[in-house]
Every structure is written in structure tokens, then in C-alpha cells.
Amino acid sequence: MTDTARLIRGARINGGEPADILIRGGVVAAVGTGLDPGGAEVHDAAGLIALPGLVDLHTHLREPGREDAETVASGSRAAAAGGYTAVHAMANTDPVADTAGVVEQVWRLGREAGHCDVQPVGAVTRGLAGVQLAELGAMADSAARVRVFSDDGMCVSDPLLMRRALEYVKAFGGVVAQHAQDPRLTEGAQLNEGAVSDRLGLAGWPAVAEEAVIARDCLLTEHVGSRLHVCHVSTKGSVQILRWAKSRGCDVTAEVTPHHLLLTDDLAEGYDPIYKVNPPLRTAEDVRALREGLADGTIDCVATDHAPHPIEAKETEWATAAMGMTGLETALSVVQHTMVDTGLLDWAQVADRMSAAPARIGRLAGHGRPIAPGEPANVTLYDADTARDVDPAAMVSKSTNTPYRGMRLPGRVVATFLRGAPTVLEGKIQ
Ligand SMILES: [Zn+2]
């Protein structure tokens, strides 16, 4: 399939003027107007936006161990449906991805499925237990070439262990992606600590539990001259700390999820656990600060934190429900809604925040590159001028715990090309 020559006709690259994109041998052969197809298969993309294939730094694919919620195959297919050509698969599987053997298994399953590139994240500590470093070097040297290390789901709260991890990954250009959550300050926490948690009688999850860890880690990173990435930033204070750290020259990057750009803690009023997530939904003031931070580059990228759960784990009481929501198939629409339609980002900046920046942070070769001659043909075609009512039953993911069900969201991914081969191709442009 990769060898089929294709001419994508009249697409607006990063929202610019219509242009043709000629793909041959898996790479972009030419970009221009009125290109001669010369036997290539032609796709009429008039009115569609072409973006470099999206890259997710933070996906939970659940395999090995929780194949009832998602598999590498189903999750990577959901990613392609959402316009992604590469995803980073988080390490909190069962067994944990803390050895070369497990990361190679995940990497191989991704290649076999072929929907998008699946880049495993390695655990920072053995079994995510926060006591001993995992085999970081062996995972880096493995066939999976791990560069991102994270105990996501758990915080590396021991400062000495965090320091050692930051020092260790320097040898191979790695990055430690921290799930910033002080465990003592969030024991039993259920919802953002504030007026809503007070009213509902749910144990509060204070912003400071996130902010204190981010501040500490920025200082640690600076001290040892390493590279830190902060997962799913969710508070205004976190954005302020990151802005300060970057102004000091600290080598820190950060991500925000689509749901933290849109949803607020008052959605918990109905005690519907579909809105239960880690970190929790925050206030409208936090949402504003996160959007501003993403717009001005304080927050580098959007990451989905796609967290599929089986129905029984979510359709239960708030206190016992699992934390997390799916996100791969709605991310671009939510970003359009919150950032583009509000005038905060243009499409070229969306390409940066959802493709170039995450690829750069993850040191992922062949992704996040501009749609230009000689580059790998990883391309997403997106119709921004349509809208859809989110239907969980129509999702590709094995799980249906989307907080957007029934919500009208703008836009739709029409096609995704991975090195020139379509992983998604809607009928209308075939
Ligand atoms: Zn997390």
C-alpha cells in the first residue's frame, strides 16, 4: 500500500492556501498547485485542512493486562481515527512496562497492528512502586528505543529517586514525564478542592498537590541539567510555575489534555463518574489559564491521556469509579472548539502543539515534520467546517467512557496517512 502514489488535491496545508500534495514511496514527493497526477491515485481534498500526522505523548493502550478495556490494536486504530500517526503508550500496564521485554512486546504489537506508530513509554521505577529505578538503560537500548520515561498514574514523589532518574536519562537524550501529584496531599481525593467539592461533600484534591511537585521538579531538573516533561497540567498555578521555570532557562516542557481545556469541576454536580479523572477537572479560571498557556507556548503540547475503562469500572458510584476518560477520537475537535474557534491558535500552531512539539519532546524520528518534499508522508485531512454529535457507540476505541457523549463538537477527521498509506479514508475522498 505504501508504494501507491497518491495526489491529495486542493488541501489547505496548516490552514493555508489550497495546494496539491503528491505522495510517492511513502514520502512527500512534491507540494504545489496544479500538480500532474501522472498515474497517482487522486483524492479530492478541496475544503479540507491538511495537518502533519498528529502525535500523542500520553495514551493508555492497556495491553498487556487489561485487554477488556483496550488493546494495542484497538487503541492505535482509535488513534488513527482521531488523526494520529504516532502515540506514546504509557507504562502502567500489567505487567508494568519496566523492562526491555515488555516495551519490546508493546512496540511489536503496534507494528503488527499497523494503524499508527506505537512508541512505548518506560516506567521510571520498578513496578511503578516509587522505590527503585527501573531498567532505564536497557529500555533505551531495546528495539523500542524508549526515550520517554514515566510512572504515570503514580507520581515519582521521592525527590532523590526523581533526581537519579533525571540524571540517568541524560545519557541517551531521554526525558522524565512526571505525573505531578503529591500522594500525601491527595490521599482519598475525589474532586478539585474548592466550592464544588465542599458542596458535594467529596474529598478535595488541592491544586497545590500538583503545583508543589512541578516546582520541585523544575528546580531539580535545573540543578542536574536534565530534561523534564510535565504530564497533564491542570491548574492556573502550574502554568505560572512553568512560565517562571522557562524564564529561568529550565529545560521543562508540559502538556495539557483536551478535557482540561474544556470541562470544569461543576460537571460533577450530578455525581456522574464519567467526569472523574486524574488530575481532576478544575475551575473555569484554571481552564482560562491553561488555554492562555497553550497559546503562548508555556504549555508546549496537547496530549490526550486517553484512558479507556470497561463500563463496570465507570458506571458505579463516584467514590469507587475508575479515573479517566477516552480522548483520541475527539482531541482535534476539542482543540478546534477551545483554541481555534476562539481565536487563540491558528492551524499552523495546532500543527505545532499536536504534532511537531510532541514528536520533538519524545525524540520521535519521522513524525512531527512539515508537509514538505522529502518528508515522510504522515498527513491528516480534517474537515473543520462540519460538526457532529459525539456518539460513544460509533467510537473505534474498545471503551466508551467519553465525557463528550451527546455533545456537539466541530470538525471531523476524513483521512489519515501513515507514510503514505491510508489508515483512515472516508468514502467521499476515495
Ligand atoms: Zn497521569
Image (tube, rainbow, N blue to C red):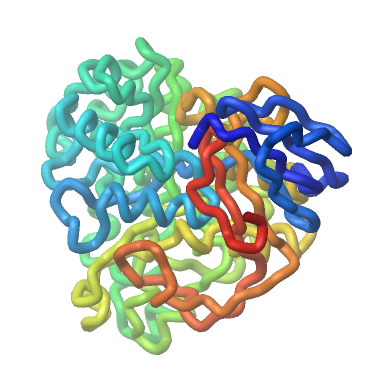
> In this orientation, does residue 352 appear?
no
Horizontally, is 380 left or right of 81 in the view? right
Horizontally, is 24 left or right of 178 in the view? right
Q: Residue furthest bottom?
A: 270
Up-down relation of residue 243 to residue 79 (above or below): above
Up-down relation of residue 14 to residue 331 (above or below): above
Residue 242, image quadrant: top right
Q: Residue furthest top?
A: 171
Q: Residue furthest front?
A: 39
Residue at the image point whose x is 22% and y is 46% from the top: 92
Location of the C terminus by quadrant is bottom right
Horizontally, is 236 left or right of 34 in the view? left
Residue at the image point whose x is 27% and y is 20% from the top: 143
For the residue pair 323 and 396, the one nearer the viewer reads as 396
Residue 49, percent from left and from top: 73, 51
For the residue pair 128 and 109, the one nearer the viewer reads as 109
Up-down relation of residue 80 to residue 242 (above or below): below
Count of numbered circles in the view: 0
Residue 380, percent from left and from top: 61, 47
> In this orientation, does residue 31 appear?
yes
Up-down relation of residue 348 to residue 426 (above or below): above
For the residue pair 21 and 244, the one nearer the viewer reads as 21
For the residue pair 70 and 136, the one nearer the viewer reads as 70
Horizontally, is 372 left or right of 248 in the view? right
Residue 195, percent from left and from top: 46, 79
Residue 393, percent from left and from top: 39, 77
Residue 41, image quadrant: top right
Residue at the image point whose x is 74% and y is 52% from the top: 44
